[in-house]
Image (cartoon, helix red, strand yellow):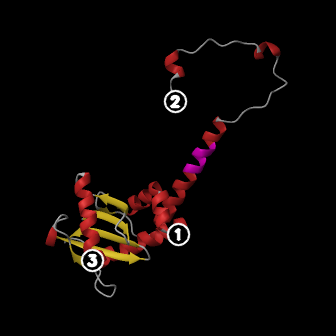
Amino acid sequence: MIKAILVFNNHGKPRLSKFYQYFNEDMQQQIVRETFQLVSKRDDNVCNFLEGGSLIGGSDYKLIYRHYATLYFVFCVDSSESELGILDLIQVFVETLDRCFENVCELDLIFHVDKVHYILNELVMGGMVLETNMSEILSRIEDQNKLEKSEAGLISLKNVNLPNLPNIPQQIKDIKLPDLPQAIKDLKF
């Protein structure tokens, strides 16, 4: 099972953190710092697996990571997960991000955090791997994008100012509607 997914830059600043086990915020920050210290000190030509830090579970857990340009993608997993399977999952995650953002970069993770979390939730939920087929993931993301666009269209229709319609009889234009109660006026949509 996956215990945590962390993405941080070369300076240790977290760009994405998803914990599948409860840790308070201070502990999460300590885990990110410790994980960064463990991963960033490693040479580029060594194995991408190492024992988890003392805060995340020690030798019972493994940190599996990939370093792409300015970002580290780190999955903390228990012994039931395959190291090579998780490396492949990281690759699928990065390639999916790359397709969705057309050459993903650190700023995409910062400014589109909701979309990044949506993509991650298509791969992993509750610490369990859901999907590894990139075309299936991209299909679901495209469906979500279509839904968002249709909702945006409905919202923009609500704000359309209708032109002065000359065919409406004057009696209908002169109808005065009663004032709405204050509670209804205070509602925000």
**Residue to which mark 2 is pinned:** 188
Mark 2 vs 1, N-terminal side: 1
Name the residue: 41% across, 57% down: 117
Q: Residues under labels 2 and 3: Cα distance?
A: 49 Å
The secondary structure type at the circle numbered 1 is helix
Q: Residues under labels 1 and 3: Cα distance?
A: 24 Å
Name the residue: 28% across, 61% down: 127
Amino acid under label 3? Glu
Q: Which residue lies most toward the right here?
A: 166
Amino acid under label 1? Arg
Q: Could you classify mark 2 by the number of other residues whose Cα lies within 10 Å: few (under 14), some (14-19), or many (20 or more)?
A: few
Residue 189 is situated, as x and y percent measured from the top left of the image, at 53, 32
Magenta part of the chain = 148-153
**Residue to which mark 3 is pinned:** 83
Amino acid under label 2? Lys
Left or right: 176 as drawn, with respect to 103: right
Q: Residues under labels 2 and 1: Cα distance?
A: 37 Å
Q: Could you classify mark 3 by the number of other residues whose Cα lies within 10 Å: few (under 14), some (14-19), or many (20 or more)?
A: some
Name the residue: 45% across, 56% down: 113
Q: Residue 41 falls in which quadrant of the image?
A: bottom left
Whether residue 33 is visible, yes or no, is yes
Name the residue: 82% across, 17% down: 169
Q: Which dot, 2 or 3, sits closer to the camera?
A: 2
The secondary structure type at the circle numbered 3 is helix
The N terminus - image quarter: bottom left
**Residue to which mark 1 is pinned:** 99
Mark 1 vs 3, N-terminal side: 3
Left or right: 145 as drawn, with respect to 22: right
